[in-house]
Image: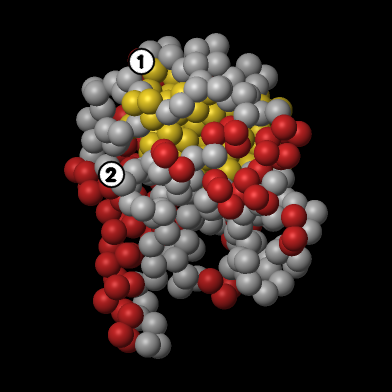
Amino acid sequence: MRIATHNVNGIRAAQRRGFETWRDERMADVIGLQEVRCPADQLPLEVFGGYHVTYDPGTLAGRNGVAVLTREPVAAVRSWGTQVLSWAPGTVPVLADVEDDCVLARELRAFVAEGRYLEVDLAGAPVTIASVYVPKGDSPVAPRDRSGSAAAQVRYQRKMAFLAGFARQLRRARLAAAGRGREYVVLGDFNIAHTRRDLRNWRGNQTSAGFLPEEREWFGSIVSPRTLVDVMRQLHPDADGPYSWWSWRGKAFDADTGWRIDYQLATPRLARLATAGQVDKETCYEARISDHAPVVIDYAI
């Protein structure tokens, strides 16, 4: 089973930049998307090809939105939001039948309408797949322009609240999947580089959002050999990267000055079935689909 995750930074822009070519060449069985950034009535449905789509667009115009694309209809849908959509190839989006037994962590209640988390049970394999988009946050260190420090603090505190609630939510989701006889894997943009190997310019970013000590400590708290495994790091234990995000600005992409912030975190048994993994970094700046590249892992399921 080939599973991919991709922050497309706007599905309409990604379509113009070649998402459909990547989709057809990669032939993934499951694709998790983040930052779809499109209301239902403006979705370019052809971009999803022959996949069944489950999509939580959220309510923030032009922001966020997570989706899971599968080859077959899914067996169950869960989300923090209430306006989840689903559709089969050749049909139009309709409201999905969402299970309402999700007990949400208190800190996450402020995020329910933002289209940040969605999970589905696969019909053809005992696996639960989740797609997540974690807030970018900000650094608590006051910038030189102190007029922006209050807003930065708000963004920092908001991300930290999300992380606190999400740690508990991940445990609940993992245990709930086990109770259904399923493995669990969460895909997506965590907006955190966990270790120095996950960030090319780590020395210059130790006070930057995404590489703060408390963010890295949080990430370390959710991964372990008994809970969730960072599958790409398991496959490439000694590699720098492979990075999945590069700034649009300057020469970051050409110089591979990137961040590894897109992950597949799987339960240990599923992680042991991973046979290969790579980041589909485009060959040149002009060919980029997004500022993120797809993270693709094959599992012997």
Q: Secondary structure at mark 2?
A: loop
Residue 270 can be seen, yes or no? no
Q: Which amino acid, by three-letter code, is at mark 1?
A: Gly
Query: Residue 142 at x, y = what percent?
Result: 35, 81
Residues at discs 2 and 1 in contact (Cβ within 8 Å): no
Which quarter of the figure has residue 150? Answer: bottom left
**Does label 2 or label 1 sit earlier along the sequence?**
2
Q: Residue at x 67, y 51 (%)?
A: 17
In the rendered image, the quadrant that contains the C terminus is top right
Q: Is residue 212 left or right of residue 103?
A: right
Q: Which residue is mark 2?
A: 113
Query: Residue 172 at x, y = what percent?
Result: 31, 29
Q: Which residue is mark 1?
A: 179
Furthest residue to the left? 106
Q: Residue at x 44, y 66 (%)?
A: 209
Residue 147's disc is: none
Query: Residue 123 at x, y = what percent?
Result: 50, 12
Query: Residue 278 at x, y = what percent?
Result: 71, 41
In the rendered image, the quadrant that contains the N terminus is top right
